[in-house]
């Protein structure tokens, strides 16, 4: 656990640096703005938590923390935006929710099924990469985000739905 926690602190620090870099870049191009509450939402991680008198090691693989009042983000795909959500603290899921819409098909299936023209069509209006290297992330390869959110109304409440304008793939 010691080494794992070290690695997760390293990841958290990386996220802080990325956030600071993005805000700095935006400040150079936008009118002056202030930042409100920030959302620090990770997935595929391990956390020591206490439920029903038990000390547990919770692995949130493909899941985010959704403790009562905690803000999170549940994204859909390059073309379908994301939801900002607030956890309801449902202990039936160990206070967890999904970390995204999730896939309906594998990356290789998506590459076989869809063309570059499909990608251009499905990401129309979004400033993003439109090359063969990201066809496996085409919006139709993911589940319907609104449905995925509807299925977890007992885990989270919706704060806002964001439309995607810009999508940057690392
Ligand atoms: N808003 C966006 N959501 C995306 C994008 N690519 C994938 N996704 C969704 O996020 C989760 C997490 O993906 P992962 O690859 O980091 O595990 C996934 O389930 C999708 O629903 C995107 O470009 N923009
Ligand atoms: Mn993931």
Image: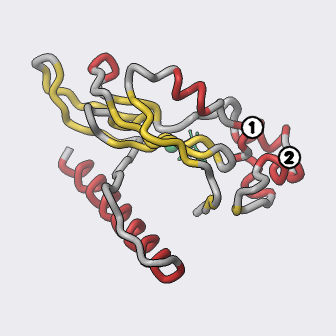
User: Residue 108 placed where, x, y %?
Assistant: 75, 40
Q: Specify the quadrant of the image occupied by residue 13.
A: bottom left
Crowd around label 1: few <14 · some 14–19 · many ≥20 (10 Å): many
Q: Which mark is residue 140?
A: 1
Q: Quadrant of ligand 1?
A: top right
| CA distance separating discs 2 and 1 | 9 Å
Report whether 145 appears left or right of 152: right
* Nearer to me, 93 or 57: 93
User: Residue 107 placed where, x, y %?
Assistant: 70, 41
Crowd around label 2: few <14 · some 14–19 · many ≥20 (10 Å): some
Quarter of the figure with the C terminus: bottom right
Report whether 67 appears left or right of 2: right
Residue under pointer 2? 118
Q: Specify the quadrant of the image occupied by residue 76.
A: top right
Q: Is residue 13 above or below residue 136?
A: below
- Under circle 1, the secondary element is helix
| Residue at the left extreme, as displayed | 53
Mark before the other along the chain sequence, 2 or 1 = 2
Residue at (66%, 36%) from the top-left corner? Answer: 142
Callout count: 2
User: Residue 89 placed where, x, y %?
Assistant: 27, 27
Check contact, mark 2 vs mark 1: CB within 8 A: yes
Report whether 1 appears left or right of 110: left
Q: Which mark is residue 112?
A: none
Report whether 61 appears left or right of 119: left
Q: Is mark 2 within 8 Å of ligand 1?
A: no
Residue at (39%, 29%) from the top-left corner? Answer: 156
Q: Is residue 125 above or below residue 91?
A: below
């Amino acid at each position: 656990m010691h080494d794992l926690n070290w690695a997760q602190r390293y990841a958290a620090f990386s996220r802080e640096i990325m956030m600071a870099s993005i805000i700095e870049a935006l400040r150079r191009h936008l009118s002056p703005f202030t930042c409100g509450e920030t959302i620090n939402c990770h997935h595929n991680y391990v956390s020591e938590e206490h439920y029903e008198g038990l000390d547990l090691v919770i692995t949130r693989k493909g899941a985010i923390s959704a403790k009562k009042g905690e803000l999170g983000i549940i994204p859909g795909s390059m073309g379908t935006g994301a939801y900002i959500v607030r956890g309801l603290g449902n202990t039936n899921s160990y206070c967890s929710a999904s970390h995204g819409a999730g896939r309906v098909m594998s990356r290789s299936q998506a590459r076989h099924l869809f063309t570059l023209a499909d990608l251009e069509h499905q990401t129309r209006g979004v400033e993003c990469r439109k090359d063969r290297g990201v066809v496996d992330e085409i919006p139709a390869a993911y589940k319907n985000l609104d449905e995925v959110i509807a299925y977890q109304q007992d885990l989270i409440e919706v704060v806002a739905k964001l439309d995607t304008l810009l999508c940057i793939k690392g």
